[in-house]
Image (cartoon, rainbow, N blue to C red):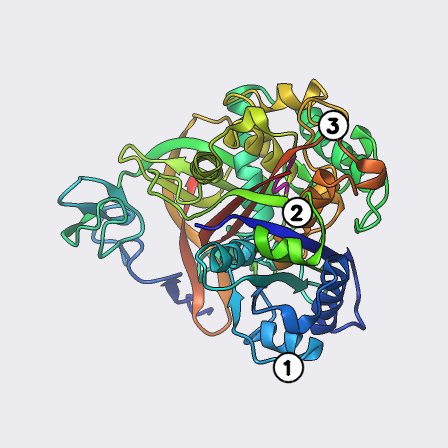
């Protein structure tokens, strides 16, 4: 396998753009990535488009606007992990030797539907109100509270931290600090999850351009951000738990760490899938940042703040930066790229040399994507 | 005189309906003949070991509350009243059943408490009649 680097990234501020077509948002993310690299569109040899709800040939509809160069275009759907899966496909296309320059785009327009209705439900789950995303995560939260003594205030602290970080990120959908009380007193969605513990719906797009280290030097001087490891996983059978978010996360992360040849102790910054507050605490454990049951202690210790030992979601995460599902994975890649190249502005993590992204897609089936980038 | 409403299961093959004699309705599941794992609803292939030798079984009527939530914001398509309780009940066979929790106040629910299967009304459908589903109660 050839060594692959990120030549550049770009994104559109997440938010609500009722008058902008999804294709144009994707197009603008491509412009931003191209500008970051100095490449022209005709240099891109293959393109992958991650999206969950935009219909057939979203990639072609978007890339044709940028220039009809006839390149192979592949659309990638893996629910919330669509963008990160598109990135890993782009990585593979270069690592394998098939192409030298690839673009991965994540794009989604969610204004038309709520997060609560974003997942596929069957003829029983839907009329009985059993299967919505907040319900699934509330069931996980309640059980976690019972098993490990997590309190509602500790749960709310995840949202407080990520909203604080979001204030420092110009690309974040929300730039608004909130207190534990405000989070707890917001409208109850599925007990114990209140409104501000659920990621918002929104629109957005983000893109990355990847190439081999050798090709990268043709366009600019280093240092370059390398793809150190990556993995995509689906479920294994776990009795009684067809959708076990911790098992799939732990197993996928383990494969990415193995490929990287290093472990969580060598990470400096993490962007993980905090679709709901409980998810962040669970994923601390799944990604090996702490032991099982110690996620809340890691949070409360302050270790995952921007100036902590292992900053998590400096971008604001899904809770504050927003979660236009197919775009999220590429927004995470962009954030870690900026962090590792010292371009993260007010939210810059000091001396960050290696970072991880984690996205988890669910909707009946599950997809988990983990990527490790290093300087 | 009001005509008695027709009762229909929410989906065929999930539980005995109509119930036979005085027997209560069981959930209908499958057991893998190779690895022994039990599932609900029925499956024609085992997701654990991929065997296609599956036997139909009647699942236990009682289980333990594994987790629950009170849903205040119902998703689109939901046909009942809000708020309502959703829970997962772990059966002795190992499978966990996601189902409405009824005849209970949230304050009396405790993880680990014993729950009992009942077949009850899910909602009224103007065309089909009274739609029945499986539920659990303390």
Q: Percent x, y for residue A147?
A: 50, 22
Residue at the (56%, 52%) spot, across then down? A132
Pointer 2 chain = A
Q: Is residue B48 left or right of A282 when viewed as pictured?
A: left
Q: Nearer the viewer, mark 1 or mark 3?
A: 1
Q: Which residues are magenta?
A: A270-274
Look at 26% across and 35% down and name the residue there.
B93
Instruction: Of the two numbered discs 2 and 3 on the same chain, state the one appearing first in sequence.
Output: 3
Q: Nearer the viewer, residue A283 or A265?
A: A265
Q: Which mark is residue A68?
A: 1
User: Where A123 falls versus A301 (above or below)?
Assistant: below
Residue A132 falls within the magenta-colored stretch: no
Q: Is residue A59 above or below residue B101?
A: below
Q: Nearer the viewer, residue A41 or A139?
A: A41
Q: Which residue is mark 2?
A: A332
Mark sitting earlier along the chain (1/3): 1
Q: Is residue A212 visible?
A: no
Determine which of the numbered discs, if any, sits on residue A305 in the image. Answer: 3
* Mark seen at residue A79: none
Asked if disc 1 and disc 3 are in contact, CB closer than 8 Å, the reply is no
**Distance Cα–Cα, label 1 vs label 3:** 44 Å
| Residue A145 quadrant | top right
Q: Chain of mark 3?
A: A
How would you rate the neighbour count of disc 1 (Cα within 10 Å): few for under 14, some for 14-19, many for 20 or more?
A: few
- Work out whether residue A216 or residue A361 is closer to the camera in this orientation and state it: A216
Q: Nearer the viewer, residue A157 or B54?
A: A157
Chain identity of mark 1 = A
Q: Label 1: state its secondary structure.
A: loop
Point out residue A118 in the picture as x, y percentages from the top left corner.
59, 59
| Same chain check for tags 2 and 3 | yes
């Amino acid at each position: 396998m050839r060594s692959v680097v990120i030549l550049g990234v770009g994104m559109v501020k997440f938010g609500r753009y009722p008058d902008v077509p999804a294709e144009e948002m994707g197009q603008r993310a491509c412009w931003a990535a191209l500008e970051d690299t100095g490449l022209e569109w005709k240099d891109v040899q293959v393109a992958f488009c991650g999206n969950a709800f935009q219909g057939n040939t979203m990639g072609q509809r978007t890339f044709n606007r940028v220039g009809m160069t006839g390149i192979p275009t592949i659309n990638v759907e893996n629910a919330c992990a669509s963008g990160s899966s598109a990135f890993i496909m782009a990585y593979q296309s270069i690592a394998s030797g098939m192409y030298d320059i690839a673009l991965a785009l994540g794009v989604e327009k969610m204004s038309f539907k709520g997060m609560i209705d974003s997942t596929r439900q069957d003829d029983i789950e839907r009329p009985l109100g059993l299967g919505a995303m907040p319900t699934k995560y509330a069931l996980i939260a309640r059980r976690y509270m019972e098993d490990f003594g997590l309190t509602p205030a500790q749960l709310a602290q995840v949202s407080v931290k990520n909203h604080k970080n979001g204030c420092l990120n110009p690309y974040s959908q929300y730039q608004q600090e909130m207190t534990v009380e405000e989070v707890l007193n917001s409208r109850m969605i599925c007990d114990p999850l209140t409104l501000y513990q659920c990621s918002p719906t929104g629109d957005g797009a983000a893109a990355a351009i990847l190439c081999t280290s050798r090709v990268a030097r043709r366009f600019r001087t280093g240092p370059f951000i390398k793809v150190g490891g990556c993995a995509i996983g689906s479920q294994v059978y776990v009795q009684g738990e067809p959708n076990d978010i911790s098992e799939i996360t732990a197993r996928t992360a383990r494969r990415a760490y193995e490929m990287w040849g290093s472990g969580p102790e060598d990470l400096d910054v993490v962007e993980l899938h905090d679709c709901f507050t409980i998810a962040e605490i669970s994923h601390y454990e799944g990604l090996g940042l702490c032991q099982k049951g110690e996620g809340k202690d890691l949070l409360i210790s302050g270790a995952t703040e921007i100036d902590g030992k292992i900053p998590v979601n400096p971008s604001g995460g899904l809770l504050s930066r927003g979660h236009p599902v197919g775009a999220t994975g590429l927004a995470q890649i962009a954030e870690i790229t900026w962090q590792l190249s010292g371009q993260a502005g007010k939210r810059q993590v000091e001396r960050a040399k290696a970072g991880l992204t984690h996205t988890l897609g669910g909707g009946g089936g599950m997809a988990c994507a983990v990527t490790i980038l290093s300087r | 005189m009001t005509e008695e409403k027709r009762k229909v299961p929410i989906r065929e093959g999930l539980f005995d309906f109509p119930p036979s004699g005085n027997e209560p309705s069981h959930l209908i599941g499958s057991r893998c003949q190779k690895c022994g794992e039990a599932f609900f609803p029925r499956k024609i292939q085992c997701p654990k070991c991929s065997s296609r030798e599956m036997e139909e079984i009647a699942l236990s009527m009682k289980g333990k509350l594994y987790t629950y939530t009170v849903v205040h914001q119902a998703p689109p398509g939901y046909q009942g009243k809000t708020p309502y309780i959703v829970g997962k009940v772990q059966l002795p066979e190992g499978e966990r059943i996601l189902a409405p929790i009824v005849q209970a106040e949230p304050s009396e629910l405790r993880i680990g408490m014993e729950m009992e299967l009942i077949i009850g009304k899910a909602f009224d459908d103007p065309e089909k009649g009274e739609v029945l589903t499986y539920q659990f109660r303390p």
